[in-house]
């Protein structure tokens, strides 16, 4: 399945960079916010860095804290970063809170696994593999999108214990797992198959249904549910054990 070929307008963006140094604000206005990576969006919020810590480096540190710190610890962690201060910290926290509030009012309901693509597509821009978990309640309404692990250019390790921690606390009834392929190919690796089977087994034990495992790139996606027999194999295995 192909996403809209104009979604990211990559060729248009390249021609727009006349001097090879893109202005992120102009890029966003011309092509939309979806063309920017998470790091670049943070750079726009920060505006500037400080001597010895350029804005790109500061944005990387901020993004790391957003992914790794609990919500109630994030403010103090940001304030401790050189170059942040109260103004930049307030800007980041306000943007995150706006995102939570606006997302919560959308009442996103998953009728098909691909319905979650708008929530995760921005991770296709990342240069490292990001493994995500989308948790849902019994009505298939999205509860949370969580980055479970960040890996290398071609691999992101994930343990079922880490993946199911938040869904258990949130009382999730089902999850969809997602990871990006920076290479641009949606073809799953042997490790992708092994990971899917391992998480399927854990989901049966925990009673939290795994609906799909989706691989995303900038222009395409791959659904294990639709394109493989992994899920039907697991169903057959469950029947054999009864």
Image (tube, rainbow, N blue to C red):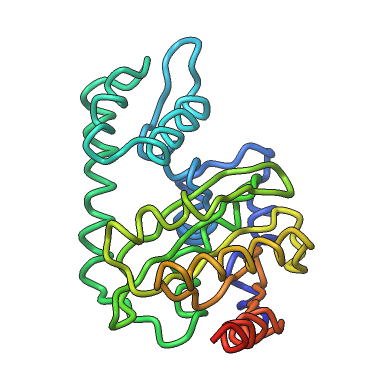
**Quarter of the image holding residue 18?**
top right
Relative image position of residue 143 (x, y in whole percent): 30, 66
Relative image position of residue 138 (x, y in whole percent): 29, 80
The quadrant the N terminus occupies is bottom right
> Going 44% across and 76% down the picture, which residue do you hit?
209
Q: Is residue 44 above or below residue 175?
A: above
> Going 42% across and 15% down the picture, which residue do you hit?
50
> Going 72% across and 45% down the picture, which residue do you hit?
153
Q: How many marks?
A: 0
Q: Would residue 19 be found to the left or right of residue 176 on screen?
A: right
> Going 28% across and 29% down the picture, which residue do you hit?
88
**Quarter of the image holding residue 167?**
bottom left
* Closer to the camera in the image, 128 or 138: 138
Furthest residue to the top? 51
Q: Is residue 184 above or below residue 212?
A: above
Relative image position of residue 230 (x, y in whole percent): 68, 79
The quadrant the C terminus occupies is bottom right
Q: Is residue 98 above or below residue 172?
A: above
* Closer to the camera in the image, 211 or 112: 211
Furthest residue to the front? 242
Q: Would residue 87 be found to the left or right of residue 208 on screen?
A: left
Relative image position of residue 69 (x, y in whole percent): 35, 35
* Closer to the camera in the image, 14 or 125: 125
Q: Is residue 39 above or below residue 78?
A: below
């Amino acid at each position: 399945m192909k996403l809209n070929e104009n979604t990211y307008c990559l060729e248009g963006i390249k021609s727009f960079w006349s001097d090879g140094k893109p202005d992120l604000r102009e890029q966003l206005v011309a092509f939309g916010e979806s063309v920017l990576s998470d790091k670049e969006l943070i750079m726009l919020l920060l505006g500037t860095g400080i001597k010895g810590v350029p804005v790109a480096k500061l944005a990387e540190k901020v993004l790391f804290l957003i992914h790794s710190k609990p919500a109630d610890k994030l403010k103090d962690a940001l304030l401790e970063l050189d170059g942040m201060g109260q103004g930049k910290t307030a800007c980041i926290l306000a943007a995150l809170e706006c995102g939570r509030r606006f997302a919560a009012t959308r009442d996103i309901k998953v009728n098909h696994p691909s319905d979650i693509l708008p929530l995760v597509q921005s991770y296709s821009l990342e240069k490292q593999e990001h493994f995500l978990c989308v948790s849902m309640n019994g009505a298939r309404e999205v509860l949370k999108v969580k980055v479970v692990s960040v890996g290398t250019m071609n691999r992101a390790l994930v343990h079922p214990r880490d993946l199911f921690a938040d869904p258990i606390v949130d009382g999730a009834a089902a999850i969809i797992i997602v990871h990006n392929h920076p290479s641009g190919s949606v073809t799953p690796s042997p490790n992708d198959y092994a990971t899917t089977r391992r998480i399927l087994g854990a989901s049966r034990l925990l009673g939290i249904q795994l609906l799909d495992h989706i691989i995303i790139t900038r222009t395409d996606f791959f659904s294990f549910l639709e394109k493989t027999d992994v899920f039907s194999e697991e169903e057959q295995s469950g029947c054999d054990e009864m």
